[in-house]
Amino acid sequence: MTGPADDGTHATGNIPSPTGTGQRTAATAAHPPDHAAYEAGTVPITSSGWTTASGALPAHAPLQGDLDAAVAVVGAGLAGSSLALHLAEAGIDVALVEAHQPGWRASGRNAGHVLPTLRDRRVFERIADGGKAFLELFREHHTITFDLARRHGIACDAVQSGYLHATQRRGVFEKLKAAAHYWSTEQGQPVQFLSGDAMRAMTGSRYYTFGVLYRDGGRVNPRC
C-alpha cells in the first residue's frame, strides 16, 4: 500500500489480507541485506516480502550450450516475458534469456498494483498522431494482466478489485474527476466517483472523504 502524496491523495489497489503472500517473517526483518547489495542489484529474491511467506519459486536451470531461435528476448521481466509469450502464441520460435531468474528485479519486487491508467498522457503530445495507435492498443489490452492469468491458469493472486485514487480535499477530487473523464469516455472504462459513506465502506476508514474508483484495476503477486 503506497503512502499519501503531497496533494493529499492516495492511490492503491485492494489491500492483501494479513494471511496473504505479502507477509514478512521475523527472520528476514532481523537480517536485512546490506545497502551495497541493494545498490548492486544482488539481493536474493528470497529477501522479497512476496516470497518470505511461501518461499521462492523453483529456480530455472542455467542454459547449457548453444540455442538457436528466430528471436531472442533478453530479460525475463514483465515486458520481456510478455513479449516472449505473445511471440510464441503467434507461432514464432523464441528464446527468453535471463541473467538471474524471471522477475528478478523490479518486475518481481513491486507493490503488485495493476493500474488501468497512464501516469501522464502529455508525453504523447510529442508524437505525430498524438499516440493514437498506442492508446488504441492500451484501450484493448489494459486488463492484460488479468486476461493472461485467466487464460493460462496462472496462480498469481490476481484480483480485479479496482484501483482507488483517494483524497481528503474536494478541490483535488474535482481534478481527479476531470482526469478520469478521458478514461471513462475515450477509453470506455467503468469509473465511479465516491464520497462519504461509500468511501468509508471502500476503505474501512473516515480518513479519506473522496475518491475515484477505476473498476478495471486491481492487484497481483508479481513473484508468481
Image (spheres, helix red, strand yellow):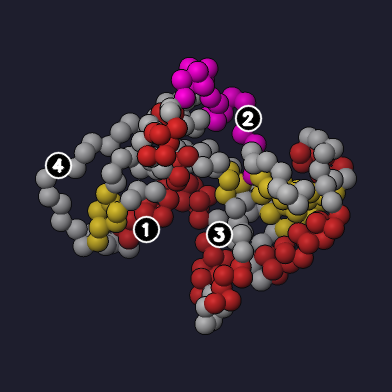
Identity, as a three-letter code, of the amino acid under mark 3:
His
Question: Which residue corresponds to mark 1?
Answer: 83
Could you tell me which secondary element the residue under label 2 belongs to? Answer: loop
Question: Of the residues tagged 3 and 4, which is closer to the observer?
Answer: 4
User: Residue 41: image x %, image y %?
Assistant: 38, 39
- The relative height of residue 165 versus residue 117 in the rendered view (above or below) is above
Q: Earlier in the sequence, mark 2 or mark 1?
A: 2
Could you tell me which secondary element the residue under label 3 belongs to? Answer: loop
User: Residue 18: image x %, image y %?
Assistant: 62, 26
> Camera-side residue: 126 or 136?
126
| Gap between marks 4 and 1 measured at Cα | 23 Å
Q: Earlier in the sequence, mark 1 or mark 3?
A: 1
Question: Of the residues tagged 4 and 2, which is closer to the observer?
Answer: 4
| Gap between marks 4 and 2 measured at Cα | 41 Å
| Gap between marks 3 and 4 measured at Cα | 37 Å
- Magenta span contains residue 118: no
Question: Which residue corresponds to mark 3?
Answer: 142
Question: Which residue corresponds to mark 2?
Answer: 17
Identity, as a three-letter code, of the amino acid under mark 1:
Leu
User: Residue 101: image x %, image y %?
Assistant: 33, 40
| Gap between marks 2 and 1 measured at Cα | 31 Å
**Circles 3 and 2 in contact, beta carbons < 8 Å:** no
Q: Earlier in the sequence, mark 4 or mark 2?
A: 2
Tell which residue pokes out farthest to the left in this image.
65
| Gap between marks 1 and 3 measured at Cα | 15 Å
Q: Dot 2, crowdedness within 10 Å: few (<14), some or many (≥20)?
A: few
Q: Dot 4, crowdedness within 10 Å: few (<14), some or many (≥20)?
A: few
Identity, as a three-letter code, of the amino acid under mark 2:
Ser
